[in-house]
Image: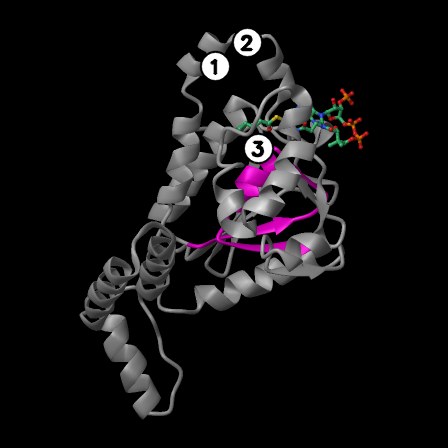
Amino acid sequence: MAYEYISVASEDGVGIITLNRPKILNALNLQLVDELVDQLEQMDRDPDIRVIILTGNARAFAAGADINEMAEASAIDIMKRNQFAVWDRISLISKPIIGAVSGFALGGGCELMMNCDIVIASETAVIGQPEIKLGVMPGAGGTQRLTRVVGERKALEMLLTGEPISAKEALKYGLVNRVVPVEAYYQEALKLAKQIAQQPPLAVQVIKKAVYKAGDLPLQEGMDYERNSFYLLLASEDRKEGMQAFLEKRKPRFTGH
Ligand code: HXC
């Protein structure tokens, strides 16, 4: 697939996807989301990529779904598009996705940010779910993922006013992991991605999956899931290598096997 609205790069085991529709603040049209998910899935299959960064530019991560594309469409048109099926594939990506977020992360942009596993935000980030101001509501997780992270009260305030919050406030509510000056947000995300890219890849993926089970499963089922995942990793080559390297006082060389 040739991409029109995203650009792609890689560096030291880190795949980098940049949303690239700057003139309209990376508004998410159907094609952009298709391109993005296609590339996420390719990177997920690529053994040379261990961590993925998803970013926009300093002014906008993404200002939401493309309103031009929605404005004229009927409810039935939009239902027939089944556009959220492609969004749902993002949560099947097994490698960690780090969001490097600056400027506007609104509507679908905020939902995309919430699909990232770790978020490094710039001080200039403006984060919110303004759909109500357009007479609608979020459709890609804005009432569900947001509520799980920030709690019902803050979610209701954000969703019912449509007013965005600052990066600092997002940090207070655990919606982002770190807030850094705008000059540094991308480098900070890259540094973190490279650090995680050094870890044993199987353990990284199994841990990611287990953490999300914590939100879905009752505690004892989650504990069982964790234990089975733990046993699975004990069967890996990287476990032998990690423990051997510790005993030999050297750096481990993880291969993902
Ligand atoms: C289409 C958009 C857009 C969007 C901005 N633009 N957001 N086009 N869809 N979501 C375009 C503007 O029309 C404008 O185009 C250009 O980007 C620059 O934007 P300005 O408004 O001139 O910039 P500024 O005054 O700085 O205001 C920035 C802004 C504002 C606060 C982000 O653009 C805004 O409120 N945008 C809409 C945000 C929003 O409601 N998002 C939720 C969408 S609904 P021109 O051609 O005039 O230069 C949604 C549903 C999700 O996301 C469902 C799941 C997918």
Give the mark nearest the N terminus, 3 or 1: 1
Where is residue 230? Give x, y as percent: 24, 69
- Please tell me whether mark 2 sits on a helix, a strand or a loop: loop
Contact (CB < 8 A) between labels 1 and 2? yes
Amino acid under disc 3? Gly
| Residue tagged 3 | 108
Residue 71, magenta (yes or no): no
Quarter of the picture for ligand 1? Answer: top right
Amino acid under disc 1? Ile
Using a 10 Å C-alpha cutoff, classify the residue at mark 1 as few (fewer than 14 neighbours), some (14 to 19) or many (20 or more).
Answer: few
Give the mark nearest the N terminus, 1 or 2: 2
Where is residue 80? Give x, y as percent: 40, 13
Q: Residue 203 occupies which quadrant of the picture?
A: bottom left
Q: Quadrant of the N terminus?
A: top left
Q: Is residue 62 visible?
A: yes
- Please tell me whether mark 1 sits on a helix, a strand or a loop: helix
In the image, 249 versus 37, the foreground residue is 37
Where is residue 168? Give x, y as percent: 72, 56
| Residue tagged 1 | 78
- Please tell me whether mark 3 sits on a helix, a strand or a loop: helix
Q: Is residue 186 visible?
A: no
**Residue at 72% in and 37% down:** 163
**Residue at 65% in and 57% down:** 171
Q: Residue 104 occupies which quadrant of the picture?
A: top right
- The verdict on label 3 being within 8 Å of ligand 1 is yes
Range drawn in magenta: 96-122
Residue 119, magenta (yes or no): yes
| Residue tagged 2 | 73
- Residue 222, compared with residue 3, is above or below; it is below
